[in-house]
């Protein structure tokens, strides 16, 4: 894997539900074509020229050294650190990325910094090792469809949908906090075999759900009932979350009316259930 060096790593994210963030890889082998916002930004700022450059990720080889310098500097301001918005921390079949991600999580946790993580890859079982990794991290997957034809076109090199869910469920079954980002949820003219109820039923076990519309896609914006469609889906997600006692946040821009209150979704630490003593 190609390597690069950076001058800094931690930054305050502009995403409404996040706090600090880091991206220890430039590029992403998943090669999503929704389009990928991170790829668009990398092109705009001259970091990559083409799609084929983008899908050859470059690891930030000095990420751990940067963290050693930056953690003391930001520690008092950090509520939690998100991995990642501009790449994928558990990129499918990219062992070097996974190894670095695990070292980063371990370092942050050892410094009492909680992580929220989001991937279209597969979570390794080692995350359940409670001596190495904290138990207050929140592990998320992106899941916007269960339709493999859709995946082939829009997330060609990411992990299969149900494998992502299975790996997430394993973390949940071992007492870790889990969440799902249903974003960017496609309009039916892009995913012709869409089934939101079925998708939600696969992720009933998670602690939190974030739902958001698909932006920057010409075909999606041509869908003539766009607003009504997203309003109906949002209501369905909210109803599902209320019924199943799941926290939720609807991303800014999904509905005409934005509810800012749920932005705090990751700011509240989910308490571990108190074991009931038996005599
Ligand atoms: S997983 Fe995320 S960063 Fe990677 S290509 Fe897909 S949208 Fe872009």
Image (cartoon, rainbow, N blue to C red):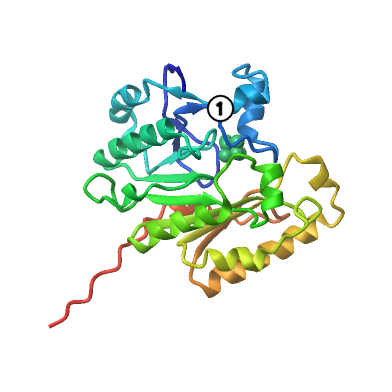
Q: Secondary structure at mark 1?
A: loop
Give the quarter of the figure containing the C terminus. Answer: bottom left
Residue 38 visible within the image: yes
The part of the image, by quadrant, that contains residue 237 is bottom right
- 201 or 37: nearer the eye? 201
Q: Position of residue 68 (x, y in %)?
A: 28, 26
Depicted 155 relative to depicted 179: above or below: above
Q: Position of residue 37 (x, y in %)?
A: 64, 34
**How packed is label 1: few (under 14 Cα within 10 Å), some, or many (20 or more)?**
many
Which residue does the image show at 51% across and 72% down from the upper left? 244
Q: Position of residue 86 (x, y in %)?
A: 54, 33
Q: In what quadrant does ligand 1 lie?
A: top right
Which residue does the image show at 66% across and 64% down from the upper left? 196
In this rendering, position of residue 106 left or right of residue 213: left
Which residue does the image show at 48% across and 51% down from the upper left? 140
Residue occupied by mark 1: 27
The part of the image, by quadrant, that contains residue 61 is top left
Which residue does the image show at 36% across and 34% down from the upper left? 99
In this rendering, position of residue 46 left or right of residue 62: right
Ligand 1 lies under 8 Å from the Cβ of mark 1:
no
Q: Position of residue 14 (x, y in %)?
A: 54, 37
């Amino acid at each position: 894997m190609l390597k690069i060096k950076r001058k800094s790593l931690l930054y305050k994210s502009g995403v409404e539900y996040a706090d600090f963030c880091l991206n220890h890889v430039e590029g992403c082998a998943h090669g999503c074509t929704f389009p990928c916002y991170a790829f668009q930004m990398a092109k705009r700022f001259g970091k990559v020229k083409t799609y084929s450059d983008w899908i050859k990720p470059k690891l930030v080889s000095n990420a751990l050294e940067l963290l050693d310098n930056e953690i003391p500097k930001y520690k008092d301001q950090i509520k939690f650190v998100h991995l990642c918005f501009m790449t994928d921390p558990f990129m499918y079949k990219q062992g070097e990325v996974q190894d670095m991600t695990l070292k980063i999580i371990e370092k942050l946790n050892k410094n009492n910094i909680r992580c929220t993580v989001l991937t279209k890859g597969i979570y390794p079982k080692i995350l359940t090792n409670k001596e190495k990794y904290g138990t207050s991290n929140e592990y998320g997957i992106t899941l916007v469809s269960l339709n493999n034809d859709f995946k082939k076109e829009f997330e060609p090199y990411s992990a299969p949908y149900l494998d992502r869910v299975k790996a997430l469920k394993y973390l949940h079954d071992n007492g870790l906090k889990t969440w799902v980002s249903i974003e960017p949820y496609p309009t039916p003219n892009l995913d012709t075999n869409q089934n939101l109820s079925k998708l939600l039923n696969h992720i009933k076990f998670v602690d939190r759900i974030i739902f958001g519309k698909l932006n920057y896609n010409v075909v999606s914006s041509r869908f003539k009932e766009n607003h009504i469609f997203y309003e109906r889906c949002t209501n369905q997600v909210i109803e599902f979350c209320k019924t199943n006692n799941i926290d939720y946040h609807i991303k800014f821009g999904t509905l005409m009316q934005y509810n800012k209150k749920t932005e705090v979704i990751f700011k509240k630490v989910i308490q571990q259930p108190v074991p009931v003593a038996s005599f």
